[in-house]
Image (spheres, rainbow, N blue to C red):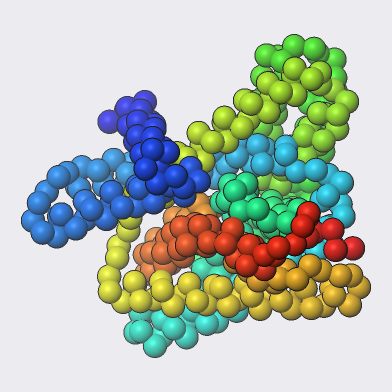
Amino acid sequence: MHIFEITAILMVLTALFSYINYRVLHLPTTIGVMFIALMASLGIVLLSWLGVDIGQGHVAGVLETIDFNQALLHGMLSFLLFAGAMHIKLDDLIKQKWAITVLATVGVVASTFMVGGLTWLVLDLLNIPASFIYCLLFGALISPTDPVAVIGILKTAGVPKSLETKIAGESLFNDGIGVVVFMIILELAQGGGEVSSGSVARLFAEEALGGVLLGLVIGVLAYQMLKRVNNYQVEVIITLALVMGGFALADRIHTSGPIAIVVAGLLVGNHGRAFAMSEITRARLDDFWELMDEILNALLFMLIGMEVLVMPFTTSLLVAGLLAIAITLFARWASVGGAIVFMRLFRKFSPGTISILTWGGLRGGISVALALSIPAAPERATIVTITYIIVVFSIVIQGMSLGRLVERIYPEMPGNPAEVES
């Protein structure tokens, strides 16, 4: 089947599920589309178990031809990150810079080791073979929160502004440290030898700091071009070129494409919008990227829902996945709680900050894509399945209930509760 045919089928299904959600479920689009896709997939599996074949093998075959890792990490992700970064105010981000920095670095590393250690104990109890190093690898890919999932859900959750900035800012920037940790542990898992502190520092500089520098360079270049044009069609094309060319260049020079695009998006979304665009350009650019964001989000979450058809589920893996949900939430709570308790020595935080940051730390397609990028190994199927279970729980259960948690913590507080923070 040709790539155009596969893309056409996916878009038709995404449109159909979006329509059903709009008419019947009335859920946020991303959650609704994924939920319907998940239910459809489970229905196909159930009918297959009952002896009714409605083409599960054919559907699974089509899904297996899609390289989820390549499609997300080297395709959709750059557009989704740029769309999200464009609408985050730089002033708000700077106010929360220390909280975001601590959560995106120390928090991710601490969570990686907690998740890895506890997962190793659980798998050992369930007699599921897994080496400790691969459990740490799982901890590295599941600890960073997913900016695509987080920003998509925050739009409808009603989270206080400062908390929204913390959650969104952390999710946008913790990919850099998360990828560095993932790559280091993967090298160790594959027998790459000892990893020195120098090689870790070099890898961090190449990925994270290199990504920031590249983002500033391409962002300033795009800003200067936008400043000299007063035609929204041309300006939309410039932003598209920035996203696609910038991400491709980052891949070529082995630095962090996600961080580069986030930095460029923040620059264009703040200084570009304020000083380089007319009112009509701002409106048209916002409409274009909002539509791009909605389409790709819906498509991505539909794919996540359908992936259940190609996951190697067993009873023991289902139990391990459910226990891993509790482990991941505990590690998130402990790492966030420790960071917030420490930072409370220097600044104030709104009530319920730890609870909302814990429950709002969603995992999404990036974790699945990283799991699928692991080369062939005995632990690969276990990691992929457990990761998928956590992601589905995170998006459907945590995503749908985050708004109610916010309402419970701030039941009758007028205005924006974020104002109590320093």
Residue 11 position by quadrant:
top left
Left/right of residue 20 with respect to residue 296 in the rendered view: left
Q: Position of residue 53 (x, y in %)?
A: 11, 48
Q: Give the x, y percent position of residue 74.
A: 55, 40
In the rendered image, the vertical position of residue 29 relative to residue 366, given as above or below? above
Q: Quadrant of the C terminus?
A: bottom right
Q: Residue at x 64, y 75 (%)?
A: 333
- The quarter of the rendered structure image containing the N terminus is top left
- Is 421 or 144 nearer to us in this picture? 421
- Please say whether residue 170 is visible from this viewpoint: no
Residue 127, can we see it?
yes
Kindly give the residue lying farthest to the bottom in the view shown: 125
- Residues 376 and 317: in front is 317
- Residue 19 in the image: state x and y as whole percent: 38, 35
User: Where residue 260 sits in the image (x, y, percent)?
Assistant: 73, 42
Q: How many marks?
A: 0
Q: Identify the residue at horizontal 41%, vertical 71% (top origin).
A: 321
Q: Which residue is at 82% across, 29% downward?
A: 272
From this view, report whether residue 8 is shown above or below residue 95: above
Q: Please indicate whether residue 332 sits to the left or right of residue 50 in the image.
A: right
